[in-house]
Image (tube, rainbow, N blue to C red):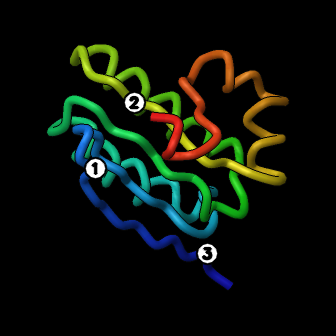
Amino acid sequence: MASEVVQQETKLENGWLVWRVEGRIDISTADSVYQSGEVIVGREEKTVLDMSGVVYISSAGLRVLLRLLKKAKREGKVFTVAGPSGAVKTVLKDSDMDTLLDMRESLDDL
């Protein structure tokens, strides 16, 4: 069974572009998520990845986050993540991604 991921964009009044990803970020979805994120991060000054709908993240997903963070930094832009919960939050913390990424509890914390 192939993994599926749903992606949506919305703009907040405070200038953040919210990129919401739902489902799994794993080896079968990582390329699609990265390609979308690369475009989004490239065109906006401040992007937040809303991870509240992400139910699983693999090492391929962690690599996507690192690549997007590096792209944003190279271009002088801001990339943050918000709302990871459960096992996803545990993976981000156990892998020390929370020390590399600006990680917010929710979109309300922006």
> Badge 2: few (under 14), some or many (20 or more) residues near its Cα, within 10 Å?
many
Q: Relative to 62, does residue 75 appear above or below in the rendering?
A: above
Residue 105 x/y as whole percent: 64, 40
Q: Residue at x 60, y 17 (%)?
A: 100
Tag in front: 3 or 1: 1
In terms of sequence position, does the residue under pointer 2 or pointer 1 come before the other?
A: 1
Q: Which of the image's four quarters has the N terminus?
A: bottom right
**Helix or strand or loop: what does disc 1 sit on?**
loop
Residue 61 horizontal side relative to residue 48, left or right: right
What is the spatial separation of the Cα atoms under label 2 and label 1, in whole angstroms? 15 Å
Q: Relative to 108, does residue 99 appear above or below in the rendering?
A: above
Residue 24: quarter of image: bottom right
What is the spatial separation of the Cα atoms under label 3 and label 1, in whole angstroms? 29 Å
What is the spatial separation of the Cα atoms under label 2 and label 3, in whole angstroms? 25 Å
Q: Residue at x 33, y 38 (%)?
A: 47
Labels 2 & 1 near each other (Cβ < 8 A): no
Residue 58 x/y as whole percent: 71, 49
Tag shown at residue 3: 3
Residue to which mark 2 is pinned: 79
Residue 90 horizontal side relative to residue 33, left or right: right
